[in-house]
Amino acid sequence: MKALEIPNNISVFYRRLVELHPEMFSYSERMALKRLLIDFYKNGETSKVIFTKRVYDKLCIINTLLSEIGLGKPAVLSVLLQEIIAEGRLSVKEIETIFKTPIEPIINGINRVRELYERNTKLESENFRKLFLSFAEDVRVILIIIAEQLQKMRTLDLSDPQTAQNIARESSFLYAPLAHRMGLYAIKTELEDLSLKHTNHEIYKEIAHKLNETKRSRDRYIDEFITPLEEKLKTLDCKFSIKGRTKSIHSIYNKMKKQNTAFENIYDLFAIRIIFDIPSEKEKSICWQAYSIVADMYQPNPNRLRDWLSIPKSNGYESLHATVLGLQNKWVEVQIRTVRMDEVAEKGLAAHWKYKGIKAENGMDEWLKNLREILENPELNAVDFMDEFKLNLYDQEVFVFTPNGDLHKLPKGATALDFAFSIHSALGSKCVGAKVNGKNVPIKYVLSNGDQVEVLTAPNQKPNLSWLQIAATSRAKSKIRQALKEVEYKDAEAGKEILTRRFKNWKITLDDAAFARVAKKAGYKTVSDFYQAVAQEKLDVHEVRTMYLDLDKRENTTEIEQRSAENFTRDTEHQNVKEDVLIIGNDLKNVDFHLAKCCNPIFGDEVFGFVAVTGGIKIHRTDCPNAPQMIQRFGYRIVKAKWEGKAEGSMYPITLQVIGHDDIGIVANISSLISKEKNILLRTISIDSNAGLFQGHLVVMVGDLKILEKLIKKIKLVKGVKQVSRM
C-alpha cells in the first residue's frame, strides 16, 4: 500500500488504520463493528484463514478509500457491512440508526453491481449498461468499485493465470480509464502497470529492469536539473517542494509503441514536479511566477504549454505543465501546482469535497448526464455502448466559445457537428456547417482551443449515415442514431401508405401477413425495410404488385403462370417475335410491353422481357439489380428480347449520379455542358453537399445508349468530378 505499510499481523494493521483516522468512529461504534464482523464471518464453516483473508481485503479497500481517494464514514460502513445487510442480519435503517450515518444510496448501488457480476462478468454483456447506470446513481459507488478492483489487482499473484489474465484485461479496458476520468491518477497508473504485468509480463519485466539499471544516472540528472532551480524558486519566499517523478512502466511502453522505438530512445522518462503550499487566493499567481523562473532558466517549448489553471479539466485536475530543454539538450516536463491541486490530482473528485467553494461537481454532473444519455439509448448495443463510453472517459479537452462568449468544453478531436449537438440536438440535426473565427467551415472541421464557433443550419438538412464518421462525441453519435431511426420509421410509414393507396386503386385486397412473406422472398430482413425500399423508390410498386399476386395465386396455377417463355413466343404469331426472341422496335404492335422503372432501359441496352401475371411484358436491362432474383425465382416467365431498328424520335429518361469536389461553379459547368449537347435534354438536377463533397442526381432525356455513354465520358472530364454512374 502507498499510504500505509501493511504488517503481517492483521490486528496491528487495523490499529494503525484506526490511529490514522481516529475521528471516524467512536469507541462504542468500533466495538459494535467488531462484533458484527466476527459474528458474521465466523458463522458456520468459515475457517480462520478465510475470515482473516476477507477482513484483511476489506481493511485494504477501506485504507484505499480513506488514504488514496478521500472518502469517509458512509463508504467505510458500506464496504464493511454490505454482505451482512444482503443476508438480512441487519437492515440499512438499523445500521443508519446505530452509526448515525446515511448509507442507503451506496448500499443500493453496490447491491445492483454485485447482482450483475454474479449473473455475468463479461464486459461485452448488455449487463454492463445496467452496471454503469448503477454507477451513475451515486459517484461513491464508482469509487468503491475502483478501490475493490485495485485490491484484486494487488493480490493477483495469488490467482490462477487465466483468472489473472481476465481480471487484468478488465482493469486495463474499463477500470483504469474510469479511474482516470474520476481524477484518480495514482490509482489509474497502478492499475495500468499491474495490468501490463499480467497481460504482457515479458515487456513489463524488461522495462522495469532497464528503469532499475538507469536509476542512478536518472537520479543524477534530476539532481543537476533541480538544484539551481531550487535556489531561484526560494526567491518567491513561500514554502514549496520539488522532486523528480519517473513515468509509469505502462506509459513508457505506450511511448515505445507510439514512436515505434526502443527503451533507450525514450528521453522523457520522468517529470519534475513543483508543489507550493500556499493559500488558495494566491495559487494562480505563484504558479505563473514559478513558470517564469523555469522559462528563464531553461528554453520552453511553446507548443507543449498546458494551462489547466485558467480552465481546469472537467474531473477537477488543475496544474501548469511546461516542457523545457534541459541539460544535455534533453526535453524535460515540469509540472507546477499547489498542495491542494496535488491532492486533487491524486485523489480526484473526492478531494474537492474537502475544499469548500472549490468543487468540480458541475463538471462531473455534466459527464454523468452525458453518460446517462448514452446508457438510455435503447438502440445502442452493448459493444457499441462500450466504444461510446470509452470515448467519454479520457478528458483531453478543447475549449471553444459561442458568438456570445459562452464557454463550451468538448473532447479533443470534436468537430463543428459535435459542437452543434452539444448545444441542442435540434440544432445539430439541421447543421450544414459553421463559422469558426469568422470563416465558413464544413461540419467535419476539427475544433481547436479558443475557437469561436457559430453554427450554420438549413431547414431541409437532416442527419445521414456518414455523420457517424464525422461526430467524435458520444452525445452527437447517440442523437444521430436516434434521428436516423426516426427517418427510417417515417420512410417505412410512407412506403406502406404508398402501397395501400396503389393497391386500393388496383382493387386488390392488401394483407399484411402476405406482405411479410413477399418481403422475405424479396430478400428484406423485415417488412419495415421492405416498405422503406418502396418509399425510397428502390423497389417499383408494379414489381411489388407482381410479387404479391404471384404469391396469392401460386396454389391456384393460372394459364399465364403455366406458360413458359417458350410457349409465349410460340403462341405470339407476330413478325416481331423471331427465333423465340422478342424484337423491340418502333413498329412493335399487338404486344403490351412497358419499360421497367427499376432500371430504365434505353435503346441499345442489353435487355430481357418479364411476363407479368396481370398480362403484358416488362423490359429490364440484363444488369438490372432485380434481374438475378427474377431469373432465379421466375425463370419460366423470362423472355429473350433485343432492340431493332433506329431510336429516332424516342427519348428515354435516365438518372445519373455525379460525385465530386464541392467547388464553386462545378454544377454550372455540368449544366452548361449538357445544354450544349444535341439530342439531350436536362429535366431535373438535385445537389446535396456534405463534408467538402457534392452528390448530384441528374435526370436527362437521351435517344440511345451511345449518346448516353458519350455524355458520361464528357461529364467525367469536368474539373472536380470524381465519379459518374448510371442509376
Image: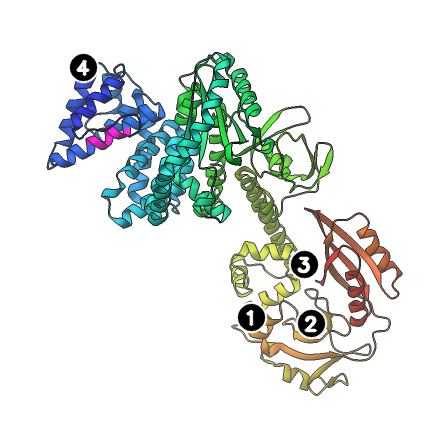
Quarter assignment of residue 227: top left
Residue range highlighted in magenta: 55-61
Q: CA distance from mark 3 to mark 2?
A: 28 Å
Callout 1: SS = helix
| Amino acid residing under circle 3 | Asn
Report the residue marked by disc 1: 553
Q: Are marks 1 and 3 in contact (CB under 8 Å)?
A: no
Residue 268 image offset from top left, x and y in percent: 47, 37
Quarter assignment of residue 223: top left
Which label sits in the foreground, 4 or 2? 4
Say above or below: 557 vs 461.
below
Dominant SS type (magenta):
helix
Report the residue marked by disc 4: 28
Report the residue marked by disc 2: 621
Residue 482 image offset from top left, x and y in percent: 55, 42
Q: Is residue 47 left or right of residue 267?
A: left
Q: Is residue 166 magenta?
A: no
Q: Residue at x 75, y 50 (%)?
A: 687
Report the quarter where the C terminus lies.
bottom right
